Image (cartoon, rainbow, N blue to C red):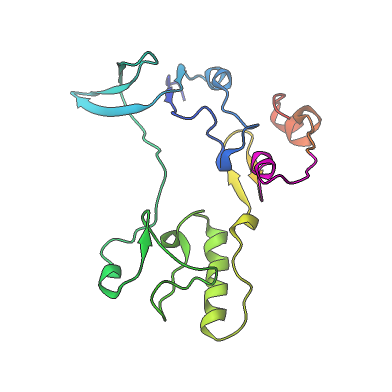
């Protein structure tokens, strides 16, 4: 859009679910018209007239200041559980989310929670399935418990990344006998339509 952009990211691998084989490529960002990328921790952003002074690690144990026109902070989202009176009735919460079991039951009998307030992953299809499981449990049916390992997700980058289940690293840590398959993106029809060649 005609603007230089500086990306500050504390994690070298910012892909969803810790996929170590999916990595952010600064070169691709520069080709898209961005200016620079830093794998560092951001500390603060201070408004100065019509600009913003952002302080980040300098990679040498100190800090440095970047002066920019705008700052967009993307540090994750969480469900809104404030001012619901949960503490008054004894509903247990943890790390900003209502604690539930696999049937969406909270620590208080008769109170259920679904969706973003029930913790990650914060996905619409996860919330929808929790809703079905929750209602079936309330009706006294026998719904199957929610298994979050089976929830598919997507990382909105370019190209997009779809994922479900254990990552390769997680499977290896569990000492599972696995086979890993890779296919070059250059042979994918999506690549032909988008004129992109990187990735496998």
- Check the picture and name the quadrant holding the C terminus: top right
- The answer to whether any part of residue 148 appears in the image is yes
Q: Position of residue 78 (x, y in %)?
A: 39, 52
Q: Quadrant of residue 56?
A: top left
Q: Residue at x 44, y 59 (%)?
A: 116
Q: Quadrant of residue 172?
A: top right
- The answer to whether any part of residue 156 appears in the image is no
Q: Quadrant of residue 41?
A: top left
Left or right of 167, for residue 106: left
The residue lying furthest to the bottom in this view is 140
Left or right of 110, for residue 71: left
Tag count in the figure? Answer: 0
Q: Residue at x 31, y 72 (%)?
A: 90
Magenta-tinted stretch: 165-179
Q: Is residue 17 above or below residue 43?
A: below
Instruction: Identify the main secondary structure in magenta.
Output: loop
Which of the pair 192/151 is nearer the observer? 151
Which of the pair 45/102 is nearer the observer? 102
Does 95 lie within the magenta span?
A: no
Left or right of 73, for residue 9: right
Q: Residue at x 25, y 72 (%)?
A: 88
The residue lying furthest to the top in this view is 60
Q: Position of residue 181 (x, y in %)?
A: 80, 37
Q: Residue at x 43, y 22 (%)?
A: 5
Q: Is residue 44 above or below residue 120?
A: above
Q: Position of residue 91 (x, y in %)?
A: 34, 70
The residue lying furthest to the left in this view is 49
Does 173 lie within the magenta span?
A: yes
Q: Is residue 52 above or below residue 86?
A: above
């Amino acid at each position: 859009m005609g603007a230089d952009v500086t990306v500050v990211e504390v994690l070298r691998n910012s892909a969803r679910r810790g996929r170590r084989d999916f990595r952010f490529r600064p070169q691709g960002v520069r080709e898209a018209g961005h200016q620079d990328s830093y794998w560092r921790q951001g500390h603060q952003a201070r408004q100065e007239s019509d600009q913003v002074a952002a302080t980040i690690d300098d990679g040498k144990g100190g800090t440095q200041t970047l002066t920019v026109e705008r700052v967009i902070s993307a540090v994750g989202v969480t469900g809104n559980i404030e001012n619901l009176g949960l503490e008054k009735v004894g509903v247990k919460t943890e790390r900003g989310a209502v604690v539930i079991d696999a049937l969406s039951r909270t620590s208080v009998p008769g109170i259920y929670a679904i969706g973003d307030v029930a913790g990650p992953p914060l996905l619409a299809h996860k919330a929808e399935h929790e809703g079905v499981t929750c209602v079936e449990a309330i009706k006294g049916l026998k719904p199957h418990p929610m298994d979050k390992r089976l929830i598919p997700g997507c990382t909105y980058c370019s190209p997009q990344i779809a994922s479900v289940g254990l990552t390769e690293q997680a499977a290896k840590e569990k000492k599972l006998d696995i086979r890993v398959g890779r296919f070059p993106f250059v042979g994918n029809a999506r690549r032909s339509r988008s004129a992109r060649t990187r990735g496998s």
